Amino acid sequence: MDVLYFAWVRERIGLPKERVETDAATVADLVSELRAREDRYDAAFADLSALRVAVDQELTDFDAPLAGAREVAFFPPMTGG
Amino acid sequence: MDVLYFAWVRERIGLPKERVETDAATVADLVSELRAREDRYDAAFADLSALRVAVDQELTDFDAPLAGAREVAFFPPMTGG
Amino acid sequence: MRIVVQEAPFDYGAECDGFATGRTDVGAVVTFAGLVRTDADLDRMEIEHYPGMTESALTAIAEEAARRWSLQDVLVIHRVGPMRPGERIMMIATAAPHRRDAFEAAEYLMDYLKSRAPFWKKEHGPQGESWVEAKATDEDALSRW
Amino acid sequence: MRIVVQEAPFDYGAECDGFATGRTDVGAVVTFAGLVRTDADLDRMEIEHYPGMTESALTAIAEEAARRWSLQDVLVIHRVGPMRPGERIMMIATAAPHRRDAFEAAEYLMDYLKSRAPFWKKEHGPQGESWVEAKATDEDALSRW
């Protein structure tokens, strides 16, 4: 699936988007896999309360299932307007 | 003092403004004097709950004193906006 | 602060534009425009007012809004005289550092302007003419503030 | 309903004007404009967004507003990319038969747009750059609805 990063999450991880092969059942499982990869992922995901997640462009929770998902995005709380 | 009428009060009484010589102590006293004059005044002031009053261009109540007042205006509830 | 009572139409777009231009301390601009609306056969509307008191009442309402909220500017334009369906009757605008102040002040201005400024609307249609009656909901709206 | 996400500046005055023109069923138009505000040394702001999700999130918010209130039209324009202090970031407009619907829908749109549409602001000043943090008061504002 495609994993996207925005704002400071993008800056800490160092890329806006990557292709990830995973069998993670939930968003939280995917986060665990990513954190295990490298320090920059571990640091970016250290405080989940500071993060938001969208699955297929819909806001959701970290316990959301990933079955059938094509795109997961991580970003800080939004500041539009 | 000058007595002014607006909207349907003006139409029922038949004039927008008149000079009234009075010793009325309050707005209510002035209303009693006006009602005693002619039927068209009596009809216009029949239901005080349907009327508003301003003394010297400030909204007030019918028991407001008239000492020193230069201008009294009677009109229905306002409908601006 | 600018308070205008006039017969002539006003340029809503230009007024909005001017209100949201050239200041770096303003974060939020709210504008409201009231139009002559008709569900049925309305040929025209006529607005009567109380010259002198109208301006002072609007100024007092705007000054009270500026006391209650953190505002950088307030504009009120209200037309009087004859108007046709679809024409703009009036507008207000508020400018503030933050959106909550701009919104609340604008709603306050509208609620007070509606029931406490000396304007009276008369509708003219094929069935004749009639004075618009004040709505209980407009009087009730004041209890919010 | 019109939802626009673009880099280019937009013409706030012309959009307001268009929204309050040529309809006799609209009684109330409310508009909001958000500007780049600065108390201090802000050279520029940069807004990042999530293409695709931005448009669908704004559309969902506007559709929900149209379900909750009696509205005749809704407009949302939001810029992305670099902006300087005083520039307009975004605007919304609502048209309704009555003012309460137009005001409440506009406040709802702003509250949700602020915290639920995928935009992120970064400020650039002489001290460097920093991401604007979401405010607890903005999240709390959603509990009104």
Image (tube, coloured by chain):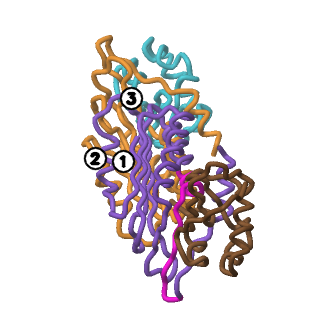
Chain colours: A brown, B cyan, C orange, D purple
- Residue type for callout 3: Lys
B26 or C43, nearer to the observer: C43
x, y (%) of residue D107? Answer: 55, 48
Indicate which disc residue C121 carries.
Answer: 3
- Residue type for callout 2: Phe
Residue that appears at 51% across and 81% down: D40
The residue stretch that appears in magenta: D110-127
Indicate which disc residue C10 carries.
Answer: 2
Q: Which residue is mark 1?
A: C77
* Direction from residue D92 to residue A50 in the image, left or right: right
Q: Are marks 1 and 2 in contact (CB under 8 Å)?
A: yes
Residue that appears at 68% across and 62% down: D136
- Residue type for callout 1: Ile
Q: Can residue B55 be seen in this snapshot?
A: no
Does the stretch in magenta take in D114?
yes
Calculate the distance from the C-alpha at mark 2 to the C-alpha at mark 3.
18 Å
C53 or C41, nearer to the observer: C41
